[in-house]
């Protein structure tokens, strides 16, 4: 897993379009030996983010944590990770691709900790990277989309007295992007308190599309800010969809949503 990500990151760094951008690099979410719920000390027990920063003269302060999908047993780093980071960098925004802990060794409780911790890491170090701590999003694909909702539900307020600097900032993302499998709402979710949310799926991917549509209806009724796009054809797993006849415009639509919400400059 680590070797694959390193190869993809190296390819990104070598891309002539991003020649002036810093090379991607990894940051562990916790120090070795301090990972909560850890069942070992190997690579699969140590969640981390891979940092993709745009060139310094292009940065606008916006950022995103990206949780690739893969059914919680693997991570689709390419089309649901690095490709998304690359497009965000094109927009002048920083991206942080999350390597979260996977089944069967780990359950949702560990993954929620990883997602919240990733948001805290970005917020705590926002000044270092020239980011706005109030413009940090969380984008999830498939299983990562379900994680995005869980991160909001499990968000922790800042604890000013904590010895851990990351716990001194909030773990709540400022907006959500949920692609394919947002899922249906649950009784415990306070949808009216959700951050602005962008939902996307293909209608032919009926389970994902219908769940996303129901979630949008309930969010809209609750008074939350939400936007949904359901493409009439297609499939699950299209990712960034470069060159796709069905989906290639979706990230431009996302950019428009972010501009309307003030998360990207117009």
Image (cartoon, helix red, strand yellow):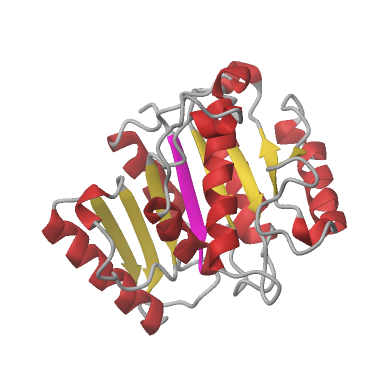
Pick the front one: 165 or 230: 165
Whether residue 158 sits left or right of residue 30 in the image: it is left
Our reading of the magenta stretch's main secondary structure is: strand
Judge whether 145 appears above or below 52 on screen.
below
Residue 59 as seen in the image, left or right of residue 39: left
Using the image, determine if residue 69 lies above or below residue 175: below
Residue sitting at x 65%, y 31%: 53
- The correct choice, above or below, for 224 with respect to 248 in the image is above
Image x and y of residue 176, in percent:
39, 50
**Quarter-wise, where is residue 31 in the image?**
top right
Identity of the residue drawn at 74% across and 24% down: 20
Where 62 sits versus 184, above or below?
A: above
- In the picture, the quarter occupied by the N terminus is bottom right
Q: Which residues are magenta?
A: 136-142
Q: Does the magenta segment cover residue 182? A: no
Residue displayed at 58% across by 43% down: 118
Q: How many marks?
A: 0
User: Can residue 104 be seen in the rendering of this structure?
Assistant: yes
Occupied quadrant, residue 69: bottom right
Residue at 57%, 21% in the rendered image: 58
Direction from residue 162 to residue 103 in the image, left or right? right
Q: Is residue 241 visible?
A: no
Estimate the x, y position of residue 237 in percent, counting from the top left.
Answer: 55, 71
The quadrant of the rendering that contains the C terminus is: top left
- The x, y position of residue 225, in whole percent, is 22, 48
x, y percent for residue 98: 64, 50
């Amino acid at each position: 897993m680590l070797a694959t990500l390193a190869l993809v990151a190296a390819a990104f760094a070598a891309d002539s379009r991003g020649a002036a951008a810093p090379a991607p690099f990894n940051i562990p979410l916790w120090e070795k030996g301090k990972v909560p719920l850890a069942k070992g000390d190997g690579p699969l027990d140590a969640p981390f983010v891979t940092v993709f920063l745009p060139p310094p003269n292009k940065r606008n302060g916006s950022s995103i944590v990206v949780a690739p999908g893969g059914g919680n047993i693997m991570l689709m780093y390419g089309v649901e990770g690095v490709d998304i980071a690359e497009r965000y960098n094109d927009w002048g925004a920083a991206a942080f691709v999350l390597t979260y802990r996977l089944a069967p060794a780990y359950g949702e409780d560990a993954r929620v900790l990883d997602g919240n911790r990733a948001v805290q890491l970005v917020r705590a170090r926002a000044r270092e990277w020239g980011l706005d701590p109030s413009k940090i999003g969380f984008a999830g694909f498939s299983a990562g989309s379900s994680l995005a909702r869980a991160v909001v539900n499990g968000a922790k307020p800042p604890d000013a007295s904590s010895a851990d600097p990351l716990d001194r900032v909030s773990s709540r993302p400022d907006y959500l992007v949920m692609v394919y499998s947002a899922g249906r709402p649950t009784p415990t979710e306070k949808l009216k308190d959700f951050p602005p949310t962008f939902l996307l799926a293909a209608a032919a991917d009926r389970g994902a599309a219908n769940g996303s549509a129901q979630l949008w209806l309930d969010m809209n009724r609750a008074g939350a800010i939400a936007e949904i796009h359901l493409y009439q054809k297609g499939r699950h797993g299209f990712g960034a969809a470069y060159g796709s006849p069905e989906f290639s415009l979706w990230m431009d639509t996302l950019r428009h949503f972010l501009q309307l919400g003030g998360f990207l400059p117009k």
